[in-house]
Image (tube, grey):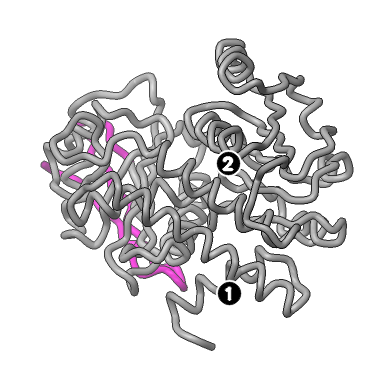
Amino acid sequence: MAIQTEVIEIPGYEKIVYGEDSKTGMKAIVAIHNTTLGPACGGIRMLPYAKREEAMEDVLRLSKGMSYKSALAGIGFGGGKSVMIGDPSKKTTEMFISFGHFIDSFEGQYIAAKDMNITGRDLFDVKRGTRYVLGIDGAPGSSGDPSPVTARGIFRAMEATMEELTGKRDLNGAKVAIQGIGHVGFGVAEAVKKAGGSLWVCDVSPEALEKAKRELGATVVGLDEIYDIPCDIFSPSARGAILNQANLARLKCKAVVGCANNQLATPEDGHRLHKQGILYAPDYAVNSGGIINIFVEYEGYNADKALKKADSIYDTMKEIFRRAKAENVPPFLIADKLAEERIYGKK
């Protein structure tokens, strides 16, 4: 299979390669940010990027993020990511087999998993070209749906947050507003309800809202109204960049703990939260259940082991909050510093 490759040198990254197969139409970039803690692992994302530069910007940001997320999760993975440049509605089996061969050329330095616009069927096709792919739904030994593990980690982060706020690791009586009741959001809501908390929820799905109302006694509010709910914890569990200058002024919560990726629109918004006296649990520190689930599969999957590993997110958040308080800086800065210490050693 004739895949044309181009190695791209960028300071701070171990390896970046653009690959293209004219026969199948496969165009992709694999970025390995750091492998100090283990092989780089990160999902495959497919988007119709208008320019190759846009794809490059995405893969660089995401691969570095995976280094930090895996480091904070305390697992033996480094950070990597891959992006496929193309229209997801025009996928072909041959394209993904070719992409599998492209991944195989990294000889295990990069391990792929599922991300945006990639299905289990796509991963089966990728596996026809390489063994370096995990998280294939329905495959023998697969870790399967990571939602329960991710939800477990988010709830443990909520416990650490409430303990920081009140001195007690307890959500009994806590008021929690959840933005997005998907697989993870609903799992978090169930845990909050079981712990004795009260729920306010919003979602684009009427069915999801009805289920939350019926099974959990949640109060349903509008998509925009969720920002104005007086609560202990606001939990962004849908789209990213919702912690921005416009929305921050509306928040009436004491803390933010959610599973959405890239919640801060800009680093400045993290500083704004801190100045407003709102405790922020950095998203990539608390939503690492997915990569934890994949790492346990890498070692030999056991669901109980994955859930137990997600419990350690509580300890990570306690450390982040302790250091943030001692240094009087926003928690997201400490999360970055802690990840860098684990990757590069104490500085």
Measuring from the top left, give residue 234's x and y in whole percent: 72, 41
Vertical position of residue 311 compared to residue 326: above or below: above
Which quarter of the rendering shows the N terminus?
Answer: top left
Give the residue type at disc 2: Ala
Vertical position of residue 235 compared to residue 23: above or below: below
Measuring from the top left, give residue 261's x and y in whole percent: 56, 45
**Secondary element at image label 1:** helix
The circle drawn on residue 230 is none
**Secondary element at image label 2:** loop
Q: Mark 2 packing: few (<14 Cα in 10 Å), some, or many (20+)?
A: many
Measuring from the top left, give residue 17's x and y in whole percent: 32, 57
Q: Does the magenta stretch include residue 297?
A: no
Provide the residue designation for mark 2: 260
**Is residue 129 left or right of 146 when viewed as pictured?**
left
Residue toward you, 41 or 346: 346
Q: Residue drawn 72% across and 44% down?
A: 233
The circle drawn on residue 337 is 1
User: Magenta segment, which residues?
Assistant: 1-27
Give the residue type at disc 1: Lys
Q: Residue drawn 50% across and 86% down?
A: 346
Which quarter of the rendering shows the C terminus?
Answer: bottom right
Q: Can residue 33 be seen in this view?
A: yes
Q: Does the magenta stretch include residue 6?
A: yes
